[in-house]
Image (tube, coloured by chain):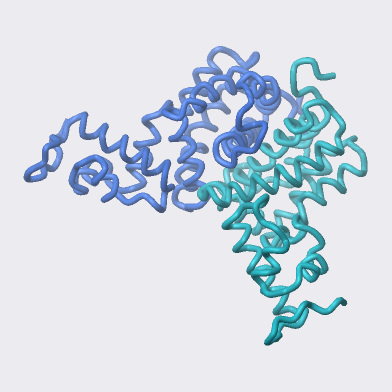
Chain colours: A blue, B cyan
Amino acid sequence: MTGPARTRRGPRAGGADTRQAVLDAARARFSAHGYDGTKLRDVAADAGVDVALVSYFFGSKDGLFTAAMAMSVNPAELVEALLREGTDGVGERLIRRLLALWDDPASGSPMVALVRSAATNEQAAELLRGFIESEVLMRVAAAIERPHANLRAALAGSQIVGLIMARYIVRVEPLAHCEPETLVAALGPTLQRYLTGEVAVGDA
Amino acid sequence: MTGPARTRRGPRAGGADTRQAVLDAARARFSAHGYDGTKLRDVAADAGVDVALVSYFFGSKDGLFTAAMAMSVNPAELVEALLREGTDGVGERLIRRLLALWDDPASGSPMVALVRSAATNEQAAELLRGFIESEVLMRVAAAIERPHANLRAALAGSQIVGLIMARYIVRVEPLAHCEPETLVAALGPTLQRYLTGEVAVGDA
């Protein structure tokens, strides 16, 4: 890898550990303060590096944001891997897999941060929208081979974002604390129908 | 109309200024203390009016909340009115009614603002959660007379919030610009199943 800009007394060299420390700090800041409330200089301070190093690695805040989100499981790859196992029961498998990821705060908070930011910041919404439309929806649409593929994928996304809002952000009961399998039974058939069932007049 | 209580210097008649003062006080109380922690008499005291005047203007706490949040329609009453027409087709009727409201920015933006706030601000999330749990879910649960009534109502809420996020906030295509009836056909059966169908093992 290319050497990073070095700070004069920098205890942190610009290697993988430093990059990781910056990403950890960024995830914590984005989770706690949302997109607008996170400053590169605060992330740099939390990670114990110069802000110039953060810029060097990630360019800008949205670059840092993208990289921080990419540290968790890539949603596009996750959905694609599930669909490679076939479309039978994909609704239940998808919701079960997502809950296993997100019920653990360590792997769940990046997605919560992403949704929080998208709700209030147009750039973050555009970032999320661009990622969803260009990566997730396209791959899902290609995999399911059904009419209205983009609509299907977006409908599934709407229920998934609604679950994130209800269980992890607004925390409405009983959704906030019910067993994962309760949600698998309730939401699985919804996702299954959106992805493979009848969603529009004339569908099989 | 009943005259308002007069403060000693009593500039406040029961007109538009007084109504505005009550709404300002309500917004401050709801923000600071959440839905359950807000009492009509405290709002009245803050605004320097008698509590009877608050009831006169807004009826009840959910009416005051609706007005304070600048919502043109009280969500609790909307859902209750739809359910009074019976549960047949309530999923499609609900989604059609909500889209008619929210596709018009004048009546839609307050709900979008509320969801945005709840996504990033814990006080706002508590406010929304309190309102939904105390007013909306309770009435829906009472009206549908099915097992798992609270779960059903919350599941429907999760899909509705997901729709708000996808169509009005993140604006993912094709959900952002598709015809309302496309969404009625796609989301109606989901809401219908959540409210009246099989959502858990052992449901009829």
Q: What residue is drawn where x is 72% and y is 24%?
A: A197
Residue A171 x %, y %:
60, 38
Residue A128 x %, y %:
48, 42
Residue A85 x %, y %:
55, 12
Furthest toward the left, the residue is: A8
Residue A125 vs A111, above or below: the answer is below
Q: Determine if residue A201 is in view.
A: no
Q: What residue is drawn where x is 66% and y is 52%?
A: B35
Q: How many marks?
A: 0
Q: In which image quadrant can residue B15 be found?
A: bottom right
Furthest toward the front, the residue is: B8
* Quarter of the figure that contains the C terminus of chain B: top right
Residue A19 x %, y %:
24, 34
Q: Determine if residue A82 is in view.
A: yes
Q: What residue is drawn where x is 27% and y is 42%?
A: A58
Q: In which image quadrant can residue A15 be found?
A: top left
Q: Is residue A128 left or right of residue A198?
A: left
Residue B80 vs B191, above or below: the answer is below
Which one is nearer the viewer's eye here, A81 or A8? A8
Q: What residue is drawn where x is 66% and y is 37%?
A: B158
Which one is nearer the viewer's eye here, A17 or A121? A17
Q: Is residue A145 left or right of residue A199?
A: left
